[in-house]
Amino acid sequence: MPAFLHRLGRLAFRRRRRMLALWLALVAAAVVCMTAFGGTGKLDNTFSIPGSESQRALDRMKTDFPTFSGTSAQIVFTATDGQKVTDPADSARIRAALGAAASAPQVAKVVSPFDAHTISADGTTAVAQVRYEVPQSALEPNALDALKSAVAGANQQGMRVDVGGSAFGNAPSESHRSDIIGVGVALVILTLTFGSLLTAGIPVVTALFGVATAIFGALSLTGTVSISSTAQSLALMIGLAVGIDYALFIVSRHRFHLAHGMEPEESAALAVGTAGSAVVFAGLTVVIAMTGLTVVGIPYLTAMGLAAAGAVLIAVLVATTLLPAILGFAGTRLTPGPGSRAMRREQAVGGAGEDAVGATGDSLASATGENVLSGTGDNVAGGTGESVAGGTGEHVASRTGEHVAGAAANAAERWFRLVTRRPLLTLVAVVASLGALAWPAHDMRLALPDNGTAPTSSSQRIAFDRVGEKLGPGFNGPLLVLADTSHSSDPATAAQRVAATIGALPDVATVGKPVANPATHTALIQVIPDSAPSDPATKTLVNSIRDDRAAILRDTGATVQVTGSTAVSVDVAAKLNSALIPFAAVVIGLSLLLLLLVFRSLVVPLKAAAGFLLSIAATLGAVVGVFQLGHLGSLIGVDTTGPVSSFLPIILLAVLFGLAMDYEVFLVSRMRESYLHTGNPLGAVHSGARHSGRVVTAAALIMTSVFAAFLTSDSTMLKQIAFALAAGVLLDAFVIRMTFVPAVLALTRHAAWWLPKWLERRLPDLDIEGDRLGPAPAVPESVALTPSTAD
């Protein structure tokens, strides 16, 4: 692969105008297809599980009870100033508003609160039901706004009108503001990293190319396949984050080569062949993990996984084709200026080179004990006769693995030296701290988001809270029981007996009168729980009704199915829970196999898997603490607690797995390269920090910033995903990869890189570091290793 990518990078560099024109044409084609065949107006936010009980019942209701099969809205009338909704003037105003609502687009039926007896005990609140025959995703773009406008006339002095209900749930969230914030923060970090606005702008430009192609391409498919707004946002945030990070890794390697005198064309080709190989490997792990979400069998999750996988795949293609073309346009302008801080830093990394000795404690030399001399016979320090350490006469490296320019160690290397000084103590501290952070996850509750977590100022949230307060929390999530009475001798009596049996169950507030369809011998029964839709007691009630179906069949001759939005949520959570452990096993097994192939070691994959589990557990604990327990939630706009989104754990597993492999590969590959050259295990750990620590740090900060920018979303699901990914990347990069990993490698020393000979002979050599491409650029003799190169 490195050789192929090397040729591809060179070709893109030489044919840069054609490559740029090709990508511009791809973006334009995606825009044209989106305009012609799709668009944001066709996004589908419907939750369903084909084949589940709730979905089978909904499918049958489309023919037996069409007005109940679609989504629904609530119109909440609240009398103020001491009045009641039953007062003649107020009731007349309500009836007029309901008449106008019946004429709103796509409305199938309006149920008056006076007919349904949905009036609060104190007479101050009345709730009308608005039913549609289509799901929320099939509503016209202006349907809900038209409903609000139709009832606005009743919103006068003495009465307040709020519109909510399931039709307003899972509404598309606006994310363009988040995009701008994320790109802005990334540009600042890149500028600080490279010290050049031109260099910093290249990863941002290429990432935007990739994101535009992915998002416009996905939106062009919304006319034929179901894609949710959350899938679009997830693809956007992941595509933007990995697009910038992948370009950052390649550009930093390219700039390193330029700083040491390599020609731009060969530098770009070599950067794509080496760093680009790691990019391809890391990107494919994300693609495989995200594509794996399709096996769960939930269309909503499948669309999220495929959209994100597509965005990552395009980011990899951009990094290996468009990026070297843009490097060709930049030419030598990306070379750090002579005497600049960036030039000193790049030369310090190259000048420090690998640790001078192995574990033998010899001076800066090869194993033969000869002095390290340039071709002229002068000492590396420039012919002064002084030792590299700066004239002190001391050996450059001791048995502890100190490197050539210890005084010039950058911040990442200084941190690695600190955490490897007492590696066992570091491991205990990391495991204890992450374990404490993960503890709340043992009490995690999963459910689909509802209007109870919508913004407090929104109409649907006000309606949700008002209904829960005045009519009971269960009224916000009624259950629908579909009874098939075709085998009963008296269908009407059988339906009534079913309703009575359900009404006797715990946590049932009220049971509505059965609505029968004599033609199909079915009846629909509405059940209002005592508890809120996301309350565990409501889930228990759903399961209790299903568990009693055998007794109901024996007593009445009727078969029952439970459906409705709350039952769908229960089924989705159950499906995801059952898939979580097998999916986690596949992801962890895949990580062990991939890292075994890349690093040809047993310890490296095992500690990577252990670190991944620690970061996942700690991230889920942090999510529970913020969103379920309410700790520090106000800092990110969480004004009410609630369950964690059912989709979050499995999405976090897939995404964080791929991103964790990014940092593992980029960081540990340089350690392995150093160990193979020097045989010094501790020095190799420090060398990895010296070469890759600064870039990995910048990449993690960029990715965290991009994800955190989406915390401004008004979608609870997207806010939870953004927080989980931001926290997960932060913990995985800085606590696991930059602390846990070096401590484990320092503790295991040579054993960290051991692989049984029989296994080594059978494993293919992936050459992820690109060793077969030739040696790294030589360091010019003029490079002096002075303390001024320190960060």
Image: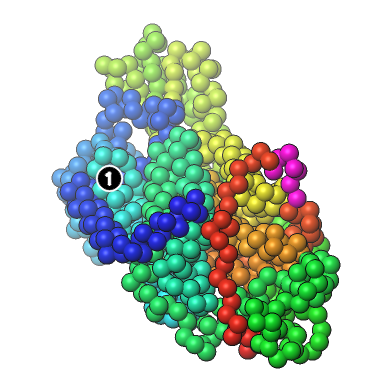
Q: Nearer the viewer, residue 519 or 656?
A: 656
Kindly tell me whether residue 294 is visible in this rendering. Answer: yes
Q: Residue at x 44, y 73 (%)?
A: 263
Res 15 quadrant in image: bottom left
- Marks counted in the figure total 1
Q: Position of residue 41 (x, y in %)?
A: 24, 51
Residue that label 1 marks: 222
Q: Residue at x 42, y 72 (%)?
A: 264
| Mark 1 residue crowding within 10 angstroms, few (<14) / some (14–19) / many (20+) | many
Task: Residue at the far front: name it.
Answer: 376
Secondary structure beneath label 1: loop
Q: Residue at x 41, y 60 (%)?
A: 9
Res 16 quadrant in image: bottom left
Q: Nearer the viewer, residue 402 or 163?
A: 402
Q: Quadrant of the C terminus?
A: bottom right
Res 382 quadrant in image: bottom right
Q: Position of residue 577 (x, y in %)?
A: 56, 39
Name the amino acid type tagged 1.
Thr
Task: Residue at the far top: name it.
Answer: 489
Q: Nearer the viewer, residue 579 or 258?
A: 258
In the image, the segment drawn in magenta is: 754-760
Q: Residue at x 57, y 67 (%)?
A: 776
Q: How is the image coloured?
A: rainbow
Residue 164 in magenta stretch: no
Kindly tell me whether residue 478 is visible in this rendering. Answer: no
